[in-house]
Image (cartoon, rainbow, N blue to C red):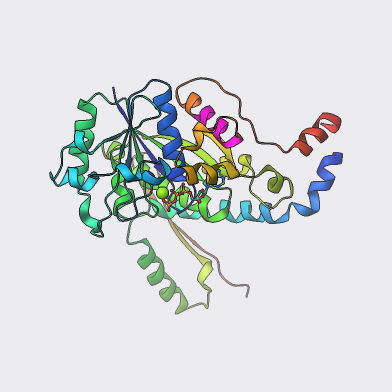
Amino acid sequence: MSKVIVVTSGKGGVGKTTTSAAFAMGLAKNGFKTVVIDFDVGLRNLDLIMGVERRVVYDFVNVINGEAGLKQSLIKDKRVENLYILPASQTRDKDALSQDGVESVIKELKNEGFDYIVCDSPAGIEKGAFMALYFADEAIVVTNPEISSVRDSDRILGILQSKSRHAEQGREVKEHLLITRYSPERVDEGQMLAVEDILEILAIPLLGVIPESNAVLQASNQGDPVILANKTRAGQAYSDIVSRFLGKTVEHRFLDTERKGFFRRIFG
Amino acid sequence: MRFFDYFRQNKKNSASQAKERLQILIAHERTSRNAPEYLPQLRHDLMSVIRKYVPIDDESVKVQVEKGAGFDVLELNITLPDS
Ligand SMILES: Nc1ncnc2c1ncn2[C@@H]1O[C@H](COP(=O)(O)OP(=O)(O)OP(=O)(O)O)[C@@H](O)[C@H]1O
Ligand SMILES: [Mg+2]
């Protein structure tokens, strides 16, 4: 049974593409045949984060329009078995993604035996974001500990619960909260919403927390998804969320500052 | 109060403000999200009718639909000014 997972947020620049790349690669590393699709038509970026930008020949819209076959358009990753990338098109035509077109591509991917189809959503709540979430079985809602991001996440949750195909059929899209760019120091200083605050407000299950980390920028410079940087906190946090997603119990880490740990030991 | 909390106390302000504002806003957005499309117009019309009789400000009229089992309730909450 293949599963369609959308990585979405409403607000832009919160870490959807970073997450899609790391998460898809993590699933593939665990032996699952995985494809990650860039739905950001006109603003292709996943190819860069995955480091395959020079191998793009055809794209998602070419496949939808029948200008290229699916198999010849999928880019096979060279680092990890079982991982494929379908890049977005750079066309400026916003209507390039038709619902029927997207559906037929997803169907074909399922027939090809993909276990996971990861959809990297564009920002906003326009057509592209809607297409990315419409066929989803599960959703990873990426949220930064910041007031407008939390609000937008709640809006996206509302859309998932009312406008997705699952919702139309009276079923639920399984929701996962992923908090990224988390900085325990700033939480301690009272400048940043804490994990518990965000959980209390959004009230959906927590998949994980990715700390603010320089490793993410470095990874994107190199074109290696940050999950490959397995000595870094961000890389390890992404590995953890993949394990959790696959049903393992993994304790959350990188939530506290060193300082807080110290105080907790003494006074806690 | 624990020793550590003492340090947190005065600095904690802006994050807890953010949390409070979000809780209020999101609660409001969730109720209006599931509401019928005519609600904002209905609210607007109600306000102009009431204003024929009493001066009220914009925030004193709350209109929302509560989902019940098998029926929905249109809830009006109008706060009159102190007289
Ligand atoms: N955990 C992190 N620590 C530090 N920087 C991060 C982290 N996650 C993401 N970033 C940075 O945030 C920026 C936006 O990330 P990304 O492109 O993944 O977001 P996005 O949600 O896909 O954006 P868009 O809405 O434009 O598609 C990038 O510069 C990325 O390096
Ligand atoms: Mg992106």
Where is residue A163? Give x, y as percent: 31, 45
Residue at position x 20%, y 36% in the image = A72
Q: Which residues are magenta?
A: A233-241
Could you tell whether A185 is left or right of A59 in the image? right
Residue at position x 53%, y 74% in the image = B56
On screen, residue A230 above or below A202: above
Answer whether residue A205 is visible to the viewer in this image.
no
Count how many numbered circles sit on residues in the image. Answer: 0
Q: Nearer the viewer, residue A31 or A196?
A: A31
Q: Is residue A148 magenta?
A: no
Quadrant position of residue A4: top left
Residue at position x 51%, y 52% in the image = A149
On screen, residue B31 above or below A231: below
Q: Residue furthest front?
A: A54
Answer whether residue B3 is visible to the viewer in this image.
yes
The C terminus of chain A is located in which quarter?
top right
Quadrant position of residue B82: bottom right
The N terminus of chain A is located in which quarter?
top left
Residue at position x 30%, y 56% in the image = A42
Q: Is residue A239 magenta?
A: yes
Q: Main secondary structure of the magenta part?
A: helix
Where is residue A255? Give x, y as percent: 66, 36
Where is residue B1? Give x, y as percent: 85, 41
Q: Residue furthest left?
A: A66
Q: Nearer the viewer, residue B40 or A37?
A: A37
Where is residue B3? Give x, y as percent: 87, 40
Could you tell whether A227 is left or right of A34 in the image? right
